[in-house]
Image (cartoon, rainbow, N blue to C red):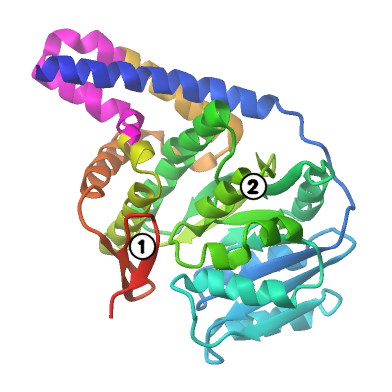
Amino acid sequence: MLVVTLLVLAAGALIYQVLTIVAAIRYRGVRPPGLSAGPPISILKPLAGAEDSLEENLRSFFEQRYPAFEILFAVRSAADPAIDIVERLQAIYPGVPSQLIVTGEPRYANAKVYSLDIMLDAARHDLVVMADSDIRVMPDMLAALAAEFEDERVGMATCPYRVVPGRSFWSTLEAIGLNTEFLSGVLVARMLDGMKFALGPTIAARRETLRRIGGFDAVKDYLAEDFMLGNLAAKHGFGVILSSYVIDHHIGAQSFAANLRHRLRWMRSARRSRPWGYAGQVFTHPLPIALLLCTVSPAWWPVLAAVVALRAAAIWATAGHVLRDPLTRRRWWLVPLQDAFTLLVWCAGFFGNTIQWRGRRYWLLPDGRFELVQ
């Protein structure tokens, strides 16, 4: 019975790898619209502390080659060390309109959403780009996004991202997983069901789209607010697209304990947001499944050979063909270890309903919302 179960799982994992390859090719086959000097844009940047490479990340937004844009920053406290970095950049780039807002303690469960809501009220323009503090972009990013919004059917765009780790083994391992396994899930979902979600690091949206879905008030109690923003936009009939523009996501260095907490937060959030999709992630772990099958029944070694070949092709399709990721090209031999570690964390994600986030403990509710544990 165990062999039969593992064979079914291995077959499903093989099919998933094929779907990943096809989805990556189809994504790259869509011709980007080019660059555009379209409408003025407001960039919303929630900040919390002076994390690794923050100044370089923020500088890349000040250096956008776009005729009309502004940048809004939000911090919780006037003592936040990120303020010094923002003020230094404001002095270096006086020609870029920018504003720093101190929000005070968040009134929402999701502090990031609270900051975004306050910044949106202060923003002057109708096209907004919400970008996390650990994002770094090239000077043509706004022009590329503006071109995609020339299609009036598009209400929201979310950017795929190439993860750049800090000087930590566990961050490197996570980056390889995000640039291969996570991206494959995004691409396959896009191909099979369309974009009914968004990715947190960078989301662009029309103000009208946000207004029609209920504004940030509609997602203030969700941990996975990015998923919900895209989901609500799609439900309200707005076009949601996976942008052709790939950004760099600098995750910084993390210890094993910090990285494990971070991964568990993602897993438990995903389980609450989309439970059936979370269960289906078993098929995204082909190498551990095939290795376990061959351990139980060595006669099935051809399955392992097929899995290795297709997993390698899927890695090339995602990290190579889509992201042009130098990390995975150099450290490809870490993929089996990453796959095994992710499978263990995925199993752990089925248990527990609390998470640790920015030093606070939260309780995850069955519908994906969360609340602070007092």
- Could you tell me which secondary element the residue under label 1 belongs to? loop
Q: Is residue 290 magenta?
A: yes
- Mark 1 crowdedness (10 Å alpha carbons): few <14, some 14-19, many ≥20: some
Is residue 203 something that shows in the picture?
A: yes
Instruction: Quickly name the residue at label 1.
Output: 254
Q: Is residue 179 magenta?
A: no
Quarter of the C terminus within the rendering? bottom left
Residue at the spot 61% in from the left edge and 70% down from the top edge: 116
Asked where in the image residue 307 lies, by quadrant, the reply is top left
119 left or right, relative to 347:
right
Residue at the spot 41% in from the left edge and 23% down from the top edge: 16
Asked where in the image residue 73 lies, by quadrant, the reply is bottom right
Q: Which residues are magenta?
A: 280-305
Instruction: Quickly name the residue at label 2.
Output: 236
Percent of width and height locating residue 281: 34, 35
Q: Give 72 or 219, whichever is nearer the viewer.
A: 219
CA gap, disc 1 and disc 2: 39 Å
Residue 232's mark? none
Query: Which amino acid lies under the numbered mark 1 shown in the image of this protein?
Result: Gln
Quarter of the N terminus within the rendering? top left
Q: Give the mark toward the camera: 1 or 2.
A: 2
Residue at the spot 30% in from the left edge and 13% down from the top edge: 305
